[in-house]
Amino acid sequence: MILSGELKDDIYAIIENLGFSVYDIETSNKKISIYIDKVGGVSISDCTDVSRNLSVLLDVEYNSSDSYTLEVSSPGINRKLRTDEHFKAAVGKKCLIKTHEKIGDTKTFRGILKSIDENSILLSNDKDIVIEKNNIKKARIDAI
């Protein structure tokens, strides 16, 4: 399932008008997962309210013959890091990074995210490790 730019704009507008920010949107097959955030955290009631408001828009966009599943949730404590904004917000936090290609003898790194620039991130454990952004396969906060 692919969301048009206009539909994404409408989703962002609804969520922001309700007092939340969009952390991420994922789509696969007929499932739309929307991760919302706000200062102080997100409750189940918040997710229900956002879901109810978005369903009205999505039911119009996807007529009744096209079924879809909408999931609205918090990005969680071990939130995924995808965008530069996500990485910037995670500076100073412990992260888990998995790479496409080995750096040294491994593809998995844990440490404190020290910085991010245009092309890479700096992760510190026992030593500083520079990881090129295009080599990052998966990244998330490693809070637990």
Image (cartoon, rainbow, N blue to C red):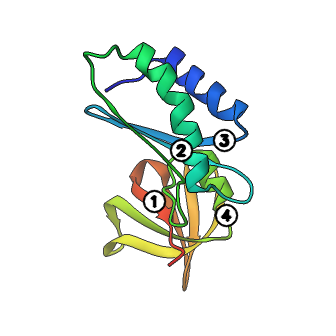
Please state which amino acid type lies under the numbered disc 4: Val
Count neighbours of disc 4 (C-alpha within 10 A) and say few if under 14, some if 14 to 19, many if 20 or more.
some
Sooner in the amino-acid sequence: mark 3 or mark 4: 3
* Foreground: disc 2 or disc 1: 2
Q: Quadrant of the N terminus?
A: top left
- Say whether marks 2 and 4 touch (CB < 8 Å): no
Relative height, residue 52 to residue 24 (above, below): above
- Say whether marks 3 and 1 touch (CB < 8 Å): no
**Label 4 element class:** loop
Sooner in the amino-acid sequence: mark 2 or mark 1: 2
Count neighbours of disc 3 (C-alpha within 10 A) and say few if under 14, some if 14 to 19, many if 20 or more.
some
**Label 2 element class:** helix
- Residue 139's disc is 1
Please state which amino acid type lies under the numbered disc 3: Ser
Relative height, residue 27 to residue 2 (above, below): below
Q: Is residue 118 visible?
A: no
Count neighbours of disc 1 (C-alpha within 10 A) and say few if under 14, some if 14 to 19, many if 20 or more.
many
Give percent across and percent down for residue 113.
Answer: 60, 68
From mark 2 to mark 4, how far is it between C-alphas? Answer: 31 Å
- Residue 21's disc is 3
- Say whether marks 2 and 1 touch (CB < 8 Å): no
Relative height, residue 138 to residue 10 (above, below): below
Q: Is residue 46 visible?
A: yes
Give percent across and percent down for residue 104.
Answer: 36, 73
Along the line of sight, which residue is nearer the eye, 105 or 28?
28
Residue beneath disc 2: 48
- Residue 91's disc is 4
From mark 4 to mark 1, how far is it between C-alphas? Answer: 13 Å
Residue located 44% across and 65% down the image: 97
**Label 1 element class:** strand
From mark 3 to mark 2, how far is it between C-alphas? Answer: 15 Å
